[in-house]
Amino acid sequence: MEIPYAVHPRPDTGIYNAKVGIWLFLASEVMLFGGLFSGYVLLRVGADQWPHGWLNVTLGTANTIILALSAITTLLAWVACKVGQFGKFKFFHACTLLLALSFLCIKGYEYHDKLIHYEIKLTDGRIADGHRIASDADSVTIEGRYVTDESQLYDLRAQKNIPRDEIKIPRSQIKSMENYGPWHNTYLALYFTLTGLHALHILGGSIVIGYLWGPGRRLWKTDPQHFTNRVEVSGLFWHFVDLVWIFLFPVLYLT
Amino acid sequence: MEPLVHTFPPYREREAAHAHEAHAHHEDIGFWRQYIFSTDHKIIGIQYGFSALCFMLFGFFLMMLMRWQIAHPGSPVPVIGPLLAKLLGQPAANGVISPELYNSFGAMHGTIMVFLAIVPLAFAAFGNYVVPLMIGAPDMAFPRVNMASYQAYVLGGMVMVVSFFIPGGAAQAGWTSYSPLATTIPTDGQFFWIIGMVFLITSSLLGAVNFIATIIQLRAPGMTWMRLPFFVWAQFVTAFLLLLAFPPLEAASLMQLMDNVAHTSFFLPTGLAVGGQLAHISGGGSPLLWQHLFWFLGHPEVYVLILPAMGIVCEIIANNTRKPVWGYKSLVYSVLAIGFLSFIVWAHHMYLTGMGTKISAFFQATTMIISIPSVIILTCLFISLWGGSIRFNTPMLFALAFLPMFGIGGLTGLPLGFNASDVYLHDTYYVIAHFHYVVAPGTIFGLFAGIYYWFPKMTGRKMNEFWGRVHFWGSLVFMNLVFMPMFAQGIKGMLRRMADGGANYSAARVPDAIGTLPGTIMELHTWILWAAMALGIAQIPFILNLFWSIRHGEKVGDNPWHSTTLEWQTPTPPPHGNFAEPPQICRGPYEYSAPGHDTDFTPQNEPDAPAMTPKTSPAPAAH
């Protein structure tokens, strides 16, 4: 038994089944991220204070460029299949996979940077804020600065060159310390949830593209059009994931 | 079956194998691939149907336990009390349902009935089995995705069931899982609930994509949009609702998961106190955000529950009145309108949250507007009865009962759609009665009708008519005895979700005190308990009939109801691939009693040539 229009387009709708499927799936993805973005809007509008300048715009820009390049290589990989140049397909999707990997590495570095960043409330009322470089049973050493009030930590846009010193704090002086994880405040909760979900999508897309690039390429020999369709459908998903980042970048990094 | 096997030569052998030896395909694909990891839409449909019916029974038992607790708060559950105590430990100590356990049962009754019973049965089971056959397709567009959808559903169901047995028991925050309650209850039930929901959402997402793609792409030649049976339209719109309404709940579930696991504060406001202590959270979250995201799914979900049942009822009414449904186009446009409008009424579940008058005016208006297409559908179905020579078989009885029962459910919803009256009725038993009338004697009757109606296609045998009628009358009477009193209880002010049925709150012992519940209202609990037990007993004939008829029911031909739609123009049960070649569709779905034909039904795939005799002979006798 063969499912009709699995490979060739149905004449009256003009598309094959998987393309209908992926567009529908992307519609639901729009609603998924739409739900999260509406959560972002509602929480930000209702917040007393909203952090600014907490993320590294340079790295964010780099990741934006990386994803934009990967969109181009994905498109070119599909075009290569369309014109029957399988060698070029392999080259372009190898680039896509490397770009995806670089994106995830940069993202991982950014997460790490946030997770070793501590806000330490001291018994004398001051706050020490900075990146942990060492800690033992008696003391914590951070590279950062003292502030007198938490509100000084919220808007870092104007504070371009904050002096950072190595500060060693005895445990006895620490009232509480918390790193900049999702539990720290609503902004970071949104940051980790949104970019985490997006990173999972990058990972999923990479696995699919990696499959087509690796073991899945056998299909090219037996049914090139079917294979090209798969490349197109996975490419549509990849472009959607890129598009989500185009919204995430300004929303989290630039505003 | 004989006449049609000739029309489908490639399947002759396979058919014969089916009839004579159940395991004939071992060398083909094997038992596991055929029955457990099947990609055949018909097997998947039956898998879904069977699992969903099991979950429905499970949900019903939870309800029975709750009704016992409501009627006799604090007394041990008779008969199965010791078993409960053994299985669930402390929360059911001495066979008494503790308030925590009552909350678990309440939350899980709702979750199981909505997400594991009704939606899988109405949408996935009937949709899988019937839709590809009705549109003349060999299978669903993505058979393996279809299988994955069922497997995700089973995993989700397992997680939900397992959660009863973890320390602290299943989720307790209601099927709506409002935050911050859902986050502050110190047990792991909610975590399991969220994980289970993620599986179930994945399952229905895969199903929805598959249904829409199938209906768009795999319609047989000549099956234009306006020739689709109304059931297919209903499933089409339902699939869109699932596709677009579920993801926001998934987003919300992710955020609640983060709240529970990563200690974020998406839904936890600043200054939240738990157990008299200021909670150690960052705060700044919004409990209302959860409610918005939840009801953005929750309200379309209501139509996910009702539309497939309307589709089933429409098919059965057309078939048993032996005339075309009245207003096919109105039905189609109404169902599309419902689909669209159901996305913009969600906040009528939230009037009590103190929304502004402008917002509530908007949602009141959309809520009233959405009742118009619903009424059009119901009216079309009623008018379809006019002047028909009605056959009162079991499916038709259930379909007919659906109309007034859904009518009661729908009309009692109007006071809940208005802000002013809802503020009074909100969170009372009136609400429970209202939505149960829509779903229980409404949707479930539609589903029973569908089971009795399509059973001969799945098995080649009819279910027993006499016991079907016993099931019908028992269900109709006791459904009403269960739910009708709840309107009275709710109007008198009895709240939902009280583990003791309001015994403490009502202070019925103080006669004439303002704000208390009259003793007569409290006594209704006992009546409802007895009616619920009788309702359970009324299902026994159905269960026995269902299994007994698989092997011993009256043998019937391929088209026992003399139906026009395509699923009856295949061999019974339809072979793998359904049709040897795509059938050519020549006419609309409800050509009953068309003048100039030998029979009172003209199948959709019968060629136009007037001289030809119908290809499908009416119901050959059992051979």
Image (cartoon, rainbow, N blue to C red):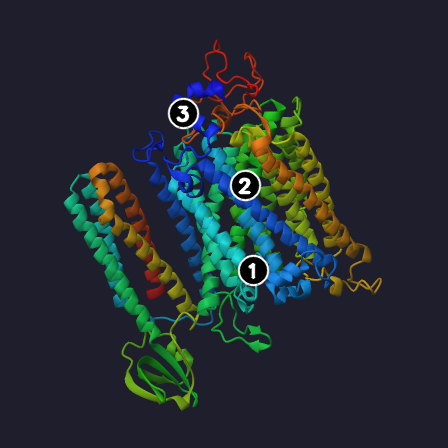
Q: Viewer-nearest of labels 2 and 3?
A: 3
The residue labelled by disc 1 is: B164
Q: Which of the two residues, A161 or A221, is positioned nearer the viewer here?
A: A221
Could you tell me how far apart the alpha carbons at marks 2 and 3 are, in whole angstroms? 33 Å
Chain under label 2? Answer: B
Q: Secondary structure at mark 1?
A: helix
Residue A20 position, x and y percent, is 36, 40
Check whether the beta carbons of the residues at disc 1 and disc 3 lie within 8 A of each other. Answer: no
Tell me what residue is drawn at x 68 percent, y 59 percent: B81
Residue lying farthest to the right in this orientation: B511
Q: Secondary structure at mark 3?
A: helix
In the rendered structure, the answer to whether residue B13 lies left or right of residue B347 reads: left
- Give the mark nearer the N terminus: 1 vs 2: 2
The residue labelled by disc 3 is: B13
Residue B122 image label: 2
Could you tell me how far apart the alpha carbons at marks 1 and 2 are, in whole angstroms? 26 Å
Same chain check for tags 2 and 3: yes
Q: Give the number of callouts.
A: 3
Q: Residues within 10 Å of mark 1 (few under 14, many from 20)?
A: many
Q: Which of the two residues, B421 or B42, is positioned nearer the viewer here?
A: B42
Residue B208 position, x and y percent, is 45, 43
Q: Amino acid at mark 2?
A: Ala
Q: Amino acid at mark 1?
A: Phe
- Give the mark nearer the N terminus: 2 vs 3: 3
Q: Which of the two residues, A188 or B3, is positioned nearer the viewer here?
A: B3
Q: Amino acid at mark 3?
A: Glu
